Amino acid sequence: MTSRPSAAARLQAHVISIGPAKSPPVVVFALWATMVAVLDLTSKQLAATLLGPDGTLPLPILRNSVRLAVVLNDQSAFGVSLGTYTWHINLVLTIVALVLAAVLCPALAALDAWAPVMLGLIAGAATGNLVGLIFSPRGVLDFIAVRSGQGHEVVFNLADVAAVVGVLLVVRTVWALGRALRQGRRAAHAPRVLAPEREAAQKGERG
């Protein structure tokens, strides 16, 4: 009598089967980008509905350092200002980032299997905040407020979190790209080895 695999084992096998090494890079990229964008927009809508325009909710476990508070951010990510044309610059940079991510995905996936995930995280984050920029003239909705030891507070959303994770994965892809360049450079400078027949023919021509 054979035992059936546990639910955890079946879930693990399913995750492995749809991992970045098993699916086309563009499909992985699109799935992650869509998932991040949907989660981000859904969380923003829930925050706006549950907390209201000026609501705040301290988290019981992290009461002194983390709270939920709706803040409309008309600056860049994490409240960074780019001057008078912040909105326009954000819009252009977001569209450029989405186009570049889609174009570069297949090439980067050949070097790093996790590149589509990295690009999907960044593209999904960009899409979530782009929708906020277009449909909310007052700014993108942030709702996760973290207070530092010096009393400074940073407010962000799930799109910002996904973007940070994506940027961290960029390090992995850059390392893979550097490794490929080094291997190509070594191959270009390596001595050429001729096949025995061709080497004998060349010796006969010289003789």
Image (spheres, rainbow, N blue to C red):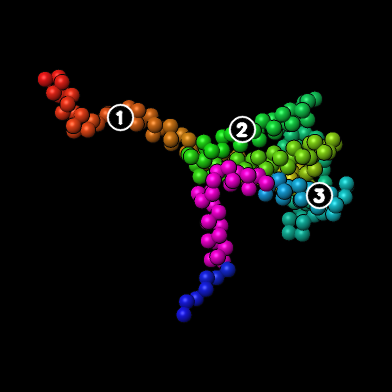
Determine the secondary structure under disc 3.
helix
Q: Please tell me whether mark 2 or mark 1 is closer to you in this view.
A: 2
Residue 29 on image: x %, y %: 60, 44
**193 to the left or right of 119:** left
Residue 101 on image: x %, y %: 61, 36
Residue 165 on image: x %, y %: 62, 44
Residue 131 on image: x %, y %: 77, 39
Q: CA distance from mark 2 to mark 1?
A: 34 Å
The boundaries of the magenta stretch are 8-34
Picture residue at 74% right of the left edge, 40% below the top? 129
Q: Nearer the viewer, residue 59 or 110?
A: 110
Identity of the amino acid at label 2? Leu
| Image quadrant assignment for residue 86 | top right
In reply to whether residue 152 is colored magenta, the answer given is no
Q: Residues within 10 Å of mark 1 (few under 14, many from 20)?
A: few
Q: Please tell me whether mark 2 or mark 3 is closer to you in this view.
A: 2
**121 to the left or right of 23:** right
> Which callout, 2 or 1, points at the residue further toward the start of the chain?
2
Q: CA distance from mark 2 to mark 3?
A: 28 Å
**CB-based contact (under 8 Å), mark 2 and mark 1:** no
Identity of the amino acid at label 1? Ala
**Magenta highlight: main SS:** helix
Identity of the amino acid at label 3? Gln
**137 to the left or right of 189:** right
Q: Which residue is mark 3?
A: 45
Picture residue at 27% right of the left edge, 29% below the top? 192
Q: Which residue is mark 1?
A: 190
